[in-house]
Image (spheres, rainbow, N blue to C red):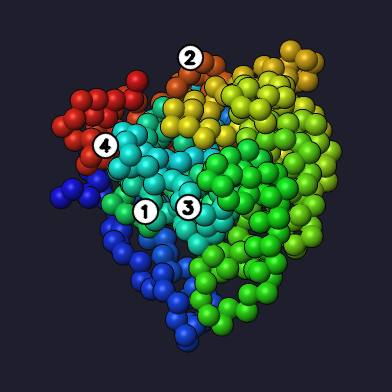
């Protein structure tokens, strides 16, 4: 069965429904209730089975900036039950795992990924991440391109401890479409991966990409002022949308204006980010996070005041003009300014090493005299990422009642030598480096060279 995801060993497939239950894609004269429009493809995610577990003796970075040496983390029924020191009582019936000499963090979260939309192998037949046929395509949804069998998902889990990720459309368009947030679990369907309760986001892009793609075709926009003109005119249309006749693009933009859909805005230059925030004020929405924001360090105060996160690389820049004035101290300077810092990947390999990227950004800060603790740096790839995706009330830190998305590392996760040893998603053990049977392998990989390889 080609679309069945197979998991070796003790992992059992969850009973995920295969189809959504709504209609879409056509204008209808008589519109259904708005609530039905909002969620035509609901999450069917169900947590894999887990057992009550106690991680004891490890150094705990809680994701919220806290560190507990010789700590204890308890989770059961998919939730964190308790986090404390060695004196935290362990209830009867818990599986006890000795973490002495090891480290525990929340599950790693990537706010900017294209896994599934640009999967491996990267061939034209799989290139489904950018509907680059119009400057604005708010009507497309990234989830409709996600291929759950992408081997990149299991690599991100096993090598990077990634338990949640946001899949974004590409950046050729000013408005690229809706992003989707996923739990990093094996599933036959994308609905079976959809993070329950996560808000949608709209991917926007400013700068060189839209003007190059569409200017190259002799159409608007071909300049930055053209970018803003097309954006503003589209927002004006959205503000006038009354919903009497279905328009998928306008529904998304209306969701943004109503505060129900977040904005993830690809933008490199500081002056342009300031312009985008002004445009958001003019049109009545807010930007949740700028992505690839290599010049955020120049406007840390503005970003702090607007409570806008910056999703950045540690040291990837200089590959085009708008990425020229980047510095490796970007994240550290933002942190010093009190702004929200997120380390993102935008890359199928980079997502497997977000811990090392956070470590590099931390080290660059230290070299210029900005002291950032290990626990704070871990927050850049856990709780802050969750905040930028609107899921921080549910995951991103080890707090009682939150999802038991947990990673046990075999050393300090900010060391290049450290790797995830065990990874739990909602309290279910989905990866164990010492148990080859717990390495998820998608049906696509079965029998192929490199099957399940996590080197």
Q: Residue at left 47%, top 68%?
A: 39
Choose the circle earlier in sequence order: 1 or 3.
3
Q: CA distance from mark 3 to mark 2?
A: 44 Å
Choose the circle earlier in sequence order: 3 or 2.
3
Which residue is label 2 attached to?
417
Which residue is label 3 attached to?
133
Q: CA distance from mark 2 to mark 1?
A: 33 Å
Tag shown at residue 190: 1
Q: CA distance from mark 1 to mark 3?
A: 24 Å
Left or right: 303 as drawn, with respect to 94:
right
In-front residue for pair 191/398 = 191
Q: In the rendered image, is residue 198 in sight? A: no
Q: In the rendered image, is residue 448 in sight? A: yes
Q: Name the front one of labels 4 and 2.
A: 4
**Local secondary structure at mark 3:** loop
**Local secondary structure at mark 2:** loop
Q: Are marks 1 and 3 in contact (CB under 8 Å)?
A: no
How many other residues sit within 10 Å of disc 4, few (<14), some (14-19) or many (≥20)? many
Horizontal and vertical percent position of residue 272:
75, 41
Residue 69, located in which quarter of the rendered image?
top right
Q: Residue at left 52%, top 35%?
A: 346
Horizontal and vertical percent position of residue 274:
79, 44
Q: CA distance from mark 4 to mark 3?
A: 35 Å
Q: Residue at left 36%, top 53%?
A: 190
Which residue is label 4 attached to?
441
Q: Residue at left 46%, top 57%?
A: 141
**Local secondary structure at mark 4:** loop
Choose the circle earlier in sequence order: 4 or 3.
3
């Amino acid at each position: 069965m080609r679309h069945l995801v197979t998991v070796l060993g003790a992992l059992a497939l969850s009973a995920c429904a295969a189809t959504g239950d709504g209609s879409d894609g056509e204008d209808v004269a008589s519109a259904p209730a708005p609530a039905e429009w909002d969620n035509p493809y609901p999450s069917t995610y169900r947590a894999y089975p887990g057992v009550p577990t106690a991680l004891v003796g490890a150094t705990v970075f809680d994701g919220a900036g806290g560190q507990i040496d010789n700590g204890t983390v308890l989770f059961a029924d998919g939730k964190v039950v308790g986090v404390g020191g060695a004196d935290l009582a362990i209830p009867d019936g818990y599986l006890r795992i000795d973490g002495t000499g090891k480290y525990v963090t929340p599950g790693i979260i990537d706010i900017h990924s294209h896994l599934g939309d640009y999967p491996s192998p990267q061939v034209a037949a799989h290139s489904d991440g950018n509907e680059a046929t119009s400057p604005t395509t708010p009507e497309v949804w990234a989830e409709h391109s996600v291929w759950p069998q992408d081997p990149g998902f299991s690599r991100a889990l096993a090598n990077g401890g990634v338990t949640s990720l946001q899949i974004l459309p590409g950046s050729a368009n000013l408005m690229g479409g809706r992003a989707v947030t996923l739990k990093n679990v094996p599933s036959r369907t994308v609905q079976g991966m959809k993070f329950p309760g996560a808000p949608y986001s709209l991917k926007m892009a400013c700068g060189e990409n839209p003007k190059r793609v569409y200017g190259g075709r002799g159409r608007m926009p071909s300049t930055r002022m053209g970018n803003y003109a097309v954006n503003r005119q589209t927002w004006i249309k959205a503000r006038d949308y009354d919903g009497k006749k279905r328009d998928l693009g306008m529904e998304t933009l209306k969701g943004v204006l109503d505060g129900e859909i977040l904005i993830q805005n690809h933008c490199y230059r500081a002056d342009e980010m300031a312009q985008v925030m002004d445009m958001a004020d003019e049109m009545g929405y807010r930007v949740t996070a700028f992505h690839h924001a290599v010049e955020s360090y120049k406007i840390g105060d503005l970003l702090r005041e607007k409570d806008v996160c910056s999703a950045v690389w540690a040291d990837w820049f200089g590959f085009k003009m708008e990425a020229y004035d980047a510095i490796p101290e970007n994240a550290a300077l933002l942190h010093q300014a009190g702004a929200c810092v997120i380390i993102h990947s935008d890359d199928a390999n980079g997502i497997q090493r977000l811990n090392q990227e956070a470590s590099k950004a931390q080290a660059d800060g230290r070299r210029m005299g900005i002291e950032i603790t290990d626990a704070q740096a871990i927050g850049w790839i856990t709780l802050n990422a969750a905040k930028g995706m609107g899921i921080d009330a549910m995951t991103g830190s080890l707090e009682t009642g939150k999802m038991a998305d947990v990673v046990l590392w075999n050393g300090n996760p900010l060391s290049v030598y450290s790797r995830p040893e065990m990874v739990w998603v909602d309290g279910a053990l989905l990866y164990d480096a010492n148990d080859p049977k717990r390495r998820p392998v998608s049906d696509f990989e079965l029998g192929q060279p490199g099957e399940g390889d996590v080197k």
